[in-house]
Amino acid sequence: TVQKMEHERLFSFTWRPYAVDPQKDYSTETPTLVEFRLEPIPGGTLLTLTESGFENIPAARRAEAYRMNEGGWTEQMKNIESHVAPKQ
């Protein structure tokens, strides 16, 4: 669910990380908050990605959800970097 959009500055949304088991109902879980923040810096733009709220994920799946998200966000940040990098 989109929470905020501030043109060229912030995009945030909530979701339920690693909610992949089709046999489980995750709708009662508190979602995490993902924020993409853009900040002008000399020579470009700094992108900061944060995700908060993992303490609200049920303990039984918290570590795995965190591990999977960490790997997923690492890959997505590489994708963003390759998309915006100057072409040589």
Image (cartoon, rainbow, N blue to C red):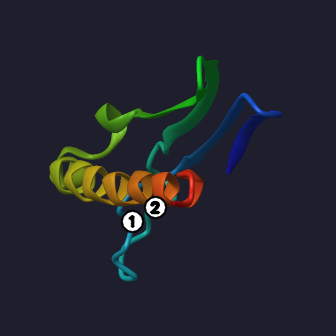
Q: Position of residue 80 (x, y in %)?
A: 51, 55
Q: Is residue 29 above or below residue 83?
A: above
Q: Nearer the viewer, residue 60 or 73?
A: 73
How busy is the neighbourhood of tag 2: few (under 14 within 10 Å), some, or many (20 plus)?
few
Q: Nearer the viewer, residue 38 or 86?
A: 86
Q: Position of residue 68 (x, y in %)?
A: 25, 59
On screen, residue 58 versus residue 6, left or right, reads left
Residue most extreme to the bottom: 22
Dot 2 lies on which element?
A: helix
Residue type highlighted by circle 1: Ala
User: Image point 27% across, 46% down: which residue?
Assistant: 58
On screen, residue 26 versus residue 87, left or right, reads left
Please identify, in this view, whether the residue under mark 2 or under mark 1 is nearer the observer.
2
On screen, residue 46 versus residue 50, left or right, reads right
Provide the residue designation for mark 1: 19
Q: Is residue 20 above or below residue 4?
A: below
Query: Contact (CB < 8 A) between labels 2 and 1?
Result: no
Q: Which mark is residue 44?
A: none
How busy is the neighbourhood of tag 1: few (under 14 within 10 Å), some, or many (20 plus)?
some
Q: Is residue 52 above or below residue 82?
A: above
User: Image point 40% across, 82% down: which residue?
Assistant: 22
Q: Nearer the viewer, residue 33 or 5?
A: 5
Q: Is residue 16 above or below residue 38?
A: below
User: Image point 18% across, 56% down: which residue?
Assistant: 64
Q: Position of residue 2 (x, y in %)?
A: 71, 46
Residue 26 in which image quadrant = bottom left
Q: Nearer the viewer, residue 44 or 57?
A: 44
Distance from Cα at disc 2 to Cα at disc 1:
22 Å
